[in-house]
Amino acid sequence: MNLAFTHDISPQRVVFAAGAISRTAEEADRLNFSHALIVATPGSGARLGQKIVDLLGARAAGLHAQAVVHVPKAVAAVGLEAARAKSADGLVAVGGGAAIGLAKAIARDTGLKILAVPTTYSGSEATPIFGLTDGERKITGRDAKVLPRTIIYDPDLTLKLPLAVSAASGMNAIAHCVEAFWVDGRTPVTLALASEAMRRFAKNLPAVIASGADAAARAECLVGAWLAGTVLAAGTALHHKLAHVLGGLGLPHAETHAIILPHVMRFNLAAAPEAKARLSEALGGNDPANAIAAMLEKFPIPQRLREIGFDRGKIDFVAGEIAAASIKMPRPASADDVRALLAKAY
Ligand SMILES: NC(=O)c1ccc[n+]([C@@H]2O[C@H](COP(=O)([O-])OP(=O)(O)OC[C@H]3O[C@@H](n4cnc5c(N)ncnc54)[C@H](O)[C@@H]3O)[C@@H](O)[C@H]2O)c1
C-alpha cells in the first residue's frame, strides 16, 4: 500500500494537573468569557457545576445542570434557550460526555466557545464531533465550532468517579484507540497517540478498577482519555457505527461500546494485520481481542447486550443500517456479518 494521509486535527489548549480546577477562572479569562453558562448533568454533576460557578464568580451566567446522555433534541433546545436567555458569552462544560455533548449542541447553534472540564474517560472534549438523538435515531456530525478551545484536566475530580462509569468510559476510550488503528484517516500521529493511550489504559484502567482512589492510575487514565479522544477525529468505522445505531435505540453509550468491542475486534483484526501488531505491542500477547475481552470480564459493568435491554427483534434493523453504511475498512461488513456479531454479543 502507498503511504498517503491527510492529517487534520485542530490544536487545543490543554491544562493538566491535580488541582487544576482552581485555574478555571484564569482559563475562562483567556477565552474572554465574562458571562459563561456552566453546563453539567444533574446530581453529582450539578455539585461540580456549582463549584465552577463559585470559582467563576461574576464571570458565571448560571448553572444549567440538565444534560442527558446522547443529547435528545429537546434537551439541546432547552440548553440553547438557557444560553440565550442568560446572554451567555461562553460555555463551561463540566462532567462526562453527556455534559460536554450538550455544550457542543449549544455551541453549534451559537458559535460560543467551550471550556471543558472532563471527569470521565470518554474523550468527547478532544473531538469536533457532536451527537444528538431524535427518536430512535442518533445523528452525529463534525463541526470545528464544537471543539472545546481549552481543556482543564484535573485528575482529583475523577477520584470518586464510580467504578462502573470509570470502567465503561475507559472502554469507550479504548474503543476510540482500537478503531484508530484501522480507519482510512489514520496518520503516523494518530497511530502513535492511539498506541500510547492503549499502553496507559492497559496498565492503569485495571488498577483504577481495583482501587478507585489510586491517584497515579487515575491521572494516567485521564491522559489516555485525552489521547483517545484526539485520535477519534481521524474517523470511525464499524465499531463506532454499530455503537451509534445501538445508541439510537436507547442503549447506554459507554456500556454498549464496551460489550461490542471484543466482538468487533475479532471480526476486523482478521483483516487488519498492522492494527493487530500495534495492539499486540500495546497490550502484550498476540490476541488483542481476547486481551480486551479478559479486561472487560473483570470490570463491574454489563457483559452482554441482553443485560442492557437490547431487543433481539432489532437485530435486522441494526444489520440493515450497518450494511447501508457500506463500511470497507478494514473489511466489508455485510448484514449477515452484523447479525452474527450481534448474536454473539447478545
Ligand atoms: N462527541 C464525541 O466525540 C463523543 C465521544 C465519546 C462519548 N460521547 C458521548 O458522551 C456520552 C457518554 O459520556 P460518558 O461516558 O463520559 O458518561 P456521562 O457523561 O453520561 O456520565 C455518566 C455518569 O457519570 C456521572 N459522573 C460524571 N463524572 C463524574 C464524577 N467525576 N464523579 C461522579 N459522577 C460522575 C454523570 O453524572 C453520569 O451520571 C454519550 O452521549 C456519548 O455519545 C461523545
Image (spheres, rainbow, N blue to C red):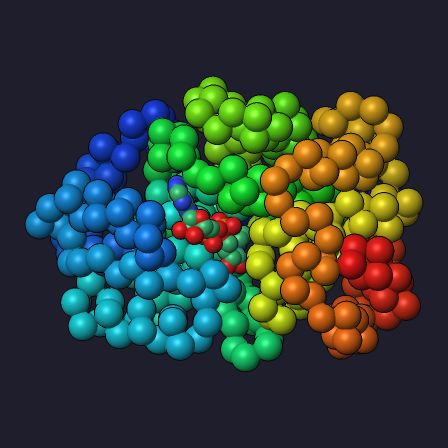
Q: Position of residue 4 (x, y in %)?
A: 75, 45
Please state if 302 lies on the left or on the right of 330 as rendered: left
Quarter of the figure with residue 88: bottom left
Instruction: Give the tally of numbered discs.
Output: 0
Q: Residue at horizontal 91%, vertical 45%?
A: 270
Q: Position of residue 142 (x, y in %)?
A: 53, 62
Left or right: 303, with 268 as reference point = left
Q: Residue at x 68, y 57 (%)?
A: 307
| The C terminus - image quarter | bottom right
Q: Nearer the viewer, residue 301 or 46?
A: 301
Left-right relation of 164 to 42: right
Image point 21% across, 43% down: which residue?
Answer: 51
Q: Residue furthest bottom?
A: 135
Instruction: Name the foreground residue: 136 vs 92.
Output: 136
Q: Quadrant of residue 28?
A: top left
One can see residue 170 in this view: no
69 or 21: nearer the eye?
A: 69
Q: Position of residue 194 (x, y in %)?
A: 65, 36
Give how far across and how far down residue 122 sits, in percent: 53, 46
Residue 162 lies, with reference to residue 18, above or below; the image says below
Residue found at the very far left of the displayed protein: 58
User: Relative to 209, does residue 33 appear above or below in the rendering?
Assistant: below
